[in-house]
Amino acid sequence: MRLPLLLLALLAPATAHADTLSLFDEGLDGCFATVGQGGRQTAEYLADAGWNGDADDEMGLGWLYPATTEDPFITVAIDGSFCQIESASIGTETAATRLRAYLDQAGQGFDPDKDENGCTRFDLGKGYAVTLTSGGDDPTCASDDNSALRFTHE
């Protein structure tokens, strides 16, 4: 009887990480599909998947979270100028791999480049881009522990 409980205890972290990756992919899709349209459109796009959040009109920002966790989360400009999916547990290498796979599956071409800070930036064309950094308030270009994909439209 103890062996199945031990096995479940060992598998729980792997399952939680798989769930975080799946939610990260949902958020990536939401940002890709709605950047340039506005934060409310991002919220509506992800609502059926259980994402919800709040906004501060004065700040011009909104925050979206999956129903069951706060990792990953989205910060979005209400005016649509950017949409950022951020994770406190997925490193930048994994985020980059998932982004490339998503863009390939969507048939979206991209030109890899660097931003003004030397961080990886993909030009998606027609004023759209996505920049890869670490997460947090003072991001760097890479982290094993966290990540952020910032979709922008100019």
Image: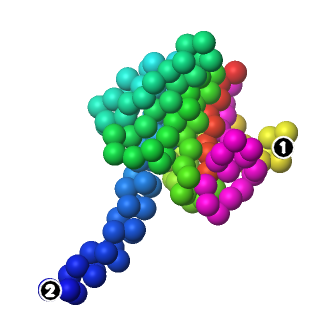
Hey, what amino acid is under mark 1?
Asn
Q: Nearer the viewer, residue 2 or 139?
A: 2
| Residue under the point 55% across and 13% down | 57
**Magenta segment:** 125-146
Q: Of helix, strand and loop, which one carries label 2?
A: loop
| Residue under the point 31% across and 75% down | 9
| Residue under the point 45% across and 44% down | 70
> Disc 2 to disc 1, how far (Cα)?
55 Å
Location of the C terminus by quadrant is top right
Q: Nearer the viewer, residue 103 or 4?
A: 4
Which residue bears the numbered disc 2?
1
Which residue bears the numbered disc 1?
117
Q: Position of residue 49 (x, y in %)?
A: 31, 37
Q: Position of residue 90 (x, y in %)?
A: 55, 57
Hey, what amino acid is under mark 2?
Met
Point out which mark residue 54 bears: none
Q: Position of residue 42 (x, y in %)?
A: 45, 26
Q: Main secondary structure of the magenta part?
A: loop
> Dot 2, crowdedness within 10 Å: few (<14), some or many (≥20)?
few
> Dot 1, crowdedness within 10 Å: few (<14), some or many (≥20)?
few
